[in-house]
Amino acid sequence: NINGASFPLLQGRQCATSPVLSKVAVFQKPVFIHQGHMQWLWDMDGRRYLDLFAGVATVAVGHCHPKVTAAVEKQLKKLWHTTNIYVNAPLHEYCEKLASHLPDPLKVIYLTNSGSEANDLAMLMARIHTGNYDIITFRGSYHGGSQQTMGLTSQSSYKYPIATSSGCTHTMCPDVFRGPWGGSHCRDSPVQTIRQCSCAQGQCMANEQYIGQLKETFAASVPSRVAGFFGEPIQGMGGAVQYPKNYFKEAYKLVREKGGVCIADEVQTGFGRTGTHFWGFQGYGILPDIVTMAKGIGNGFPMAAVVTTPEIAASFAKAYHFNTFGGNSVACAVGSAVLDVRIKEDGLQQNCHHVGTYLMTELAKLRDKHKIIGDVRGKGLQIGVEMVKDKTSREPLCPQAMMEIFEDVKDMGVLIGKGGLYGQTFRIQPPMCITTADVDFFLAVFDKAIHNYMDRQIGAKRH
Ligand code: PMP
């Protein structure tokens, strides 16, 4: 029984409602997925859905992409495992290919199985390399659900009352929509917010204020030396939150002055999703010391990675790091196929830029039309639509209203996600192969769902 709906086939262990699912994707009437192809999913009754969430930006090149599926089949017949302890072709080919997509000196790769595991490892590396302990990240962030990374994660719904990693401090998220500073021109996005920007001509006041908050965090909450700073280029679970354009540049400088290393969590933003660049951090002109990646790396196959510099890797070689499944041959074959498809064959990074810009531009028109759409933001196909009760106060739309619209969109055949500290943001992070025709379909559905909600509100007031 999930939220009142009974699904006999889902009884037992799978029924456990995970906090992630209940926040981002559980419907009042759950969808029971049976099959997928590219940007489409089918349920047990044969209903087709346009998937605009891709299992949280995970199915990057498309569900059951024929070339990725063929690569898995081929590798399954040859060799599955005992590979990362011996020299073998899939592992080496994959690492070379992945390294070729990263700037110097980010060339040392550690393969893991999930984003949480990758971020665990990055925390450990930062601490071992610097000899310091404290790590800073943003409020509202999600970096994993393991006991270590839960300390980094900063959303109460994903936190259990246990001792998570100590030494994790959350600084103010430089959110130029919901936060006290910023607005129109602070962020790198093809669309602008309708909120007036508090910045003076030629100078980003929001950046100064949020960097000021980081300085205060250094002064008040951590020792004089820190191990590192984690940041997603666009905060995914926080609701596709974007920061002032220069924030990272200045934050990285401050962190390094305190002896720390800078870690880019590219679990959602990596592999071309932001459209203009292969990695989200490149959009800010910064160079992290450690990059973590998962989700889209394997198009849904469980794999993840940490990439760092030879210098940090040398410090980390003090003990032997071992991972049984990280770098297994099937995962490496999948990862290689994903890189080939995405880069060479299907031009998916360019598609993210093209289709994503179109989607955001059209969503901005809906924002101007509907009083409950407060903000449209993002880059490429990493998009957030923040819903409000009122555009001036920016009070978040209540969970019940969000659920009604979410459910209606699903019933009309489109799957989207939710996020944000108050669950107030719809998230669009589809397979990177969607088309402008798919976008037009979604826009019509979304517009209709908002009209339906507003009509119900008016009806309720009349009675
Ligand atoms: N980092 C980010 C930015 C994420 O969004 C997630 C998962 N939502 C993770 C890390 C953790 O990844 P996983 O679920 O694979 O452990």
Image (tube, grey):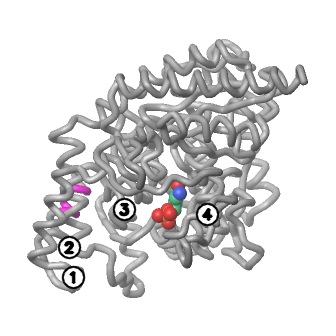
Residue where numbered disc 4 is placed: 6
Please tell me which of labels 3 and 1 falls first in the chain.
Answer: 1
Residue where numbered disc 3 is placed: 307
Report, in whole angstroms, how far the alpha carbon at label 1 lies from the one at label 2.
6 Å
Ligand 1 within 8 Å, label 2 CB: no
Report, in whole angstroms, how far the alpha carbon at label 4 lies from the one at label 1.
40 Å
| Prevalent SS, magenta region | helix
Give percent across and percent down for residue 155.
70, 56
Report, in whole angstroms, how far the alpha carbon at label 2 lies from the one at label 4.
40 Å
Quadrant holding the C terminus:
top right
In the rendered image, residue 96 lying in the magenta stretch gets the answer yes
Report, in whole angstroms, how far the alpha carbon at label 2 lies from the one at label 3.
18 Å
Q: Is residue 178 left or right of residue 153?
A: right
> Residue at image x 29%, y 47%?
37
Indicate the secondary structure of the residue bearing disc 1.
loop
Please tell me which of labels 1 and 2 falls first in the chain.
Answer: 1
Badge 3: how crowded within 10 Å, few (<14), some, or many (20+)?
many
> Residue at image x 65%, y 25%?
450
Confirm or deny contact between disc 1 and disc 2 (CB under 8 A): yes
Disc 3 marks which amino acid?
Val
Residue where numbered disc 1 is placed: 81
Residue where numbered disc 2 is placed: 329
Whether residue 205 is visible to the viewer of this picture, yes or no, is no
